Amino acid sequence: MPLEMNVSQIELALTPVLYEWRSIKEHHTTVAVDVLRATTSICAAFTAGAEEIVPLDTLAGLEPYRRQGYLRAAERGGKKVDGAECGNSPTEYLSMDLRGKRIAYSTTNGTVCILRGSDADRTLVGCFANISALTGQLLDAPQDLVILCSGWKNDFSIEDTLFAGALCQRLIDSGKYASSNDAVHMALALWQMCGDDPHGFSIQHASHAKRLNGFGERAVSDMDFSFRQDTCPVVPRLTHGILKCSRP
């Protein structure tokens, strides 16, 4: 699609290591994505009442927050870290009363991705669980957009790319956004290929979905939940290193 005047442009970074090589660098919004499961869990935690979430890229960073009364949430390799009060499970968060709670949060891929995108004018958290609320915010205040997928240990992931395709489809269909970025067009094609069944497509093809499928019933429930749209209509935004939640 050719570039158009007065239309915000979209670029897709398929992994965090590609983010620094993006073309859009000035005055842009970044949407950080980790469908399985960090950004879905973050939206779930805010839906359950969490006051704020501090994303951290190391486990060592959790301890100072514990002393300040934060809950510690941590995951490595898809599994909850010993000693943490919470893991990386959206269904677990939704079963908890988190009203007024503050969470210090570190995961293998998702929190690293969020922090990598922190140089943007707006850094938002995206997933299928909040896709309509997120789309609404992006359409209400159009700005050049970089979608940053967390992938798996800096490798491409199908589930994050499917979400990127779904989000791009909505934004481009609005007429307020366009893209000439090859990664965006690939994501759109993948989204169309999945036939509006990202869960089934990911179970069949995505390596991380297959990995989580071996981690027990909770992880299987998490996967089912993570591909449902609009279950957590909140839009977390990173400001000064802290995620706060806004609602549509």
Image: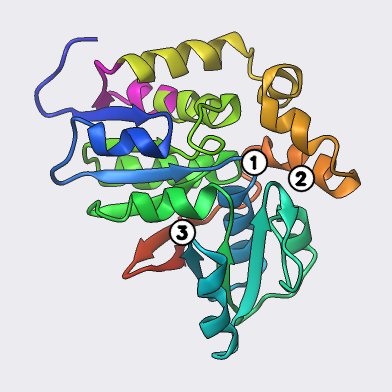
Q: Of all residues shown, which one is farthest toward the left? A: 5
Tell me: 128 left or right of 89.
left
> What separation in Å lies between label 3 and label 2 (alpha carbons)?
19 Å
Q: Residue at x 58, y 74 (%)?
A: 103
Instruction: Kindly check if marks 1 and 2 are in contact, taking CB atoms under 8 A apart as contact.
Output: yes
Q: Nearer the viewer, residue 172 or 181?
A: 181
In the rendered image, which residue does mark 1 sit on?
36
Q: Nearer the viewer, residue 166 or 216?
A: 216
Residue type marked 2? Asp
In the rendered image, which residue does mark 2 sit on?
222
Residue stretch rendered in magenta on the structure? 169-181
Q: Residue at x 47, y 23 (%)?
A: 165
Residue 77 location (% of width, % of height): 68, 47
Q: Nearer the viewer, residue 112 or 52?
A: 112
- Relative to 82, is 170 above or below? above
Residue 240 location (% of width, % of height): 31, 70
Which image quadrant is residue 201 in? top right
Please identify the quadrant where the C terminus is shown.
bottom left
> What separation in Å lies between label 3 and label 1 (alpha carbons)?
17 Å
In the rendered image, which residue does mark 3 sit on?
236
Q: Nearer the viewer, mark 3 or mark 2?
A: 2
Query: First in sequence: mark 1 or mark 2?
Result: 1
